[in-house]
Image (cartoon, helix red, strand yellow):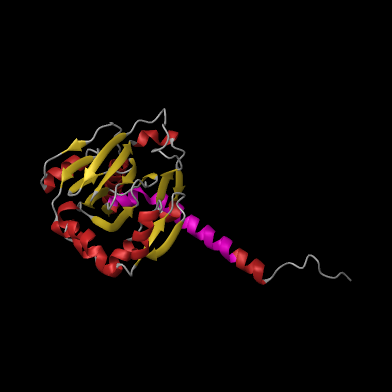
Amino acid sequence: MNTLITLLTICTVIIIYMHVVYQLTTSNDLEIFELDTPSKIKLEEVCNLRQPLLFPYYDESLQSVFSKLTEYKAFDVNVYDSSYNSNIISLNNAFQLFDKKNYISLHNSDFLNETMLSRYYITTDAYLRPPMVASITYDLLMGSEGSTTRLEYNTHYRNYIYLANGSVTIKLTPPKNEKYLNAEKDYANELYYSPKHVWNTTLDKVKFLEITITKGQMLFIPSYWWYSIKFEKDSCVCTLQYKTVMNIIATLPNICMGILQRHNTKTKLKSTLTFHANPSSSDGSHT
């Protein structure tokens, strides 16, 4: 019996190890694949090659997201200026900002849930979601004409970008170039980005793929690939991100670092509040 338990334990460890290695595998070939409306099986096969993939995806539900926005102008969205300072304002005010200044809007999962626009994303799950999904994140991205997102990557097993309206230009570079990008890692919020502005400066040691995506096209961006989005006028981007069970296990170190960061932030905040509530009497009287 002990021998059987030992063998089962060893087999389990080996299987988990193989899956973790597979999850962390990346491709550094500077090329993008294109397919004409792949089947679900073909989509999974090509995505598993860890290369960016562009394909047409005609989905009336996702394309209707942009036209539905006018019905929810009173709801709040997150907006960011060119320095990535954030603010929460109504969608109506965000549209006005887009016409006047350089702003982008992202991290809008709450907006999608509050307005029930997320239901239009759910219709695509049967086609896009990989097996053993444990977590799904939907987002809505918009911006002023010419505005750009930070150069960033994520650790999701599947990361899809869909154009519901307009067009965007995306710069991509493979994971091997991280050493040249001065990566900053906010584990608490699962944000991994570079402070370098790739649209106004030339990085001598880093080569980029640059691709323009138009309405009705879907781009798959593999885990750990860096990308930055440049918006055109009236662009509307839907993102669909999927984490699998093994994907979460493979990124446990990042998850643990996030827990530690959040704990340290709470500890520092508590210490600061305690200090202000009980300030030291350095100028007190002496007897």
The reply to whether the magenta stretch includes residue 28 is no
- Picture coordinates of residue 213 (x, y %)? 23, 43
Is residue 249 part of the magenta span, yes or no? yes
- Asked whether 70 or 59 is in front, the reply is 70
Q: Is residue 99 left or right of residue 45?
A: right
Q: Is residue 220 placed above or below 205 in the rendered structure?
A: below
Which quadrant would the C terminus be assigned to in this image?
bottom right
Which residue is situated farthest in the top direction here? 204
Seen at 48% across and 59% down, the residue is 262
Q: Is residue 97 left or right of residue 41?
A: right
Tell me residue 16's x, y (percent).
29, 47
Image vertical order of residue 277 relative to residue 42, above or below = below
Query: 221 or 98: nearer the eye?
Result: 98
| Residue 275 visible (yes or no) | yes
Q: State the extent of the magenta-drawn residues as a range.
A: 246-270
- Name which quarter of the figure residue 29 lies in: top left
